[in-house]
Structures are given as C-alpha cells and as structure tokens.
Image (spheres, rainbow, N blue to C red):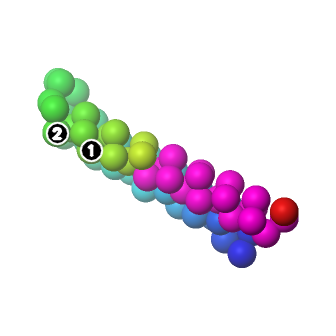
Amino acid sequence: MLLFSLALIVVAELLNTALETVVDRIGHEFNTLSGKAKDIGSAAVFVSLVTAFLTWLIILW
C-alpha cells in the first residue's frame, strides 16, 4: 500500500508532463483554457502528494 501511494505520485507527474507537452505543442500563445488545463494537471499532482502523505501517516502512526 505504501509503495502504491508513491507510484500514484509518479503516474500523476507523468500524466501532468504529458498534458503540459500537448498544451505547449498546440501553441505557445496565452490561452485561458490552456492555463486552466495546466493548473488542473498540477492540482492532480498535489492531490496525489497529499493522498500519499496521509496514507503513510495513517499506516505508520
């Protein structure tokens, strides 16, 4: 379970990187929706970090 929570972070980071690459490939000019997509990807990484932290805290406490 502990290793799975760490793997979740890696998967979220990989998906976020892929999302940012696709958004950048479409165009480098500023677009509100592109910014929102990148923010949502970053939020997913943050949620995975918090989930992993809480998992470790609950199991090891």
Q: Secondary structure at mark 2?
A: helix
Q: Residue at x 51, y 47 (%)?
A: 46
Residue 57's disc is none
Which stretch did the figure color magenta? 44-60
Q: What residue is shown with label 1?
A: 37
Q: Quadrant of the C terminus?
A: bottom right
Q: Amino acid at mark 1?
A: Ala
Q: Amino acid at mark 2?
A: Leu
Rendered location of residue 29, percent (x, y): 17, 24
Residue at the outermost top position: 29
Q: Residue at x 16, y 39 (%)?
A: 33
Q: Quadrant of the N terminus?
A: bottom right
Relative to 58, 61 lies left or right: right
Location of residue 12 with respect to 36 vertically, above or below: below
Q: Does the residue at mark 1 contact the one at mark 2 (Cβ under 8 Å)?
A: yes
Q: Nearer the viewer, residue 42 or 56?
A: 56
Relative to 31, 8 lies left or right: right
Rendered location of residue 22, percent (x, y): 28, 46
Residue at the outermost right position: 61
Q: Secondary structure at mark 1?
A: helix
* 10 Å crowding of disc 1: few (<14), some (14-19), many (20+): some
Q: CA distance from mark 1 to mark 2?
A: 6 Å
* 10 Å crowding of disc 2: few (<14), some (14-19), many (20+): few
Q: Nearer the viewer, residue 25 or 53?
A: 53
Does residue 19 appear in this view?
A: yes
In the rendered structure, does residue 5 fall within the stretch colored magenta? no
Q: Residue at x 75, y 65 (%)?
A: 58
Rendered location of residue 9, percent (x, y): 59, 56
Q: What residue is shown with label 2?
A: 33
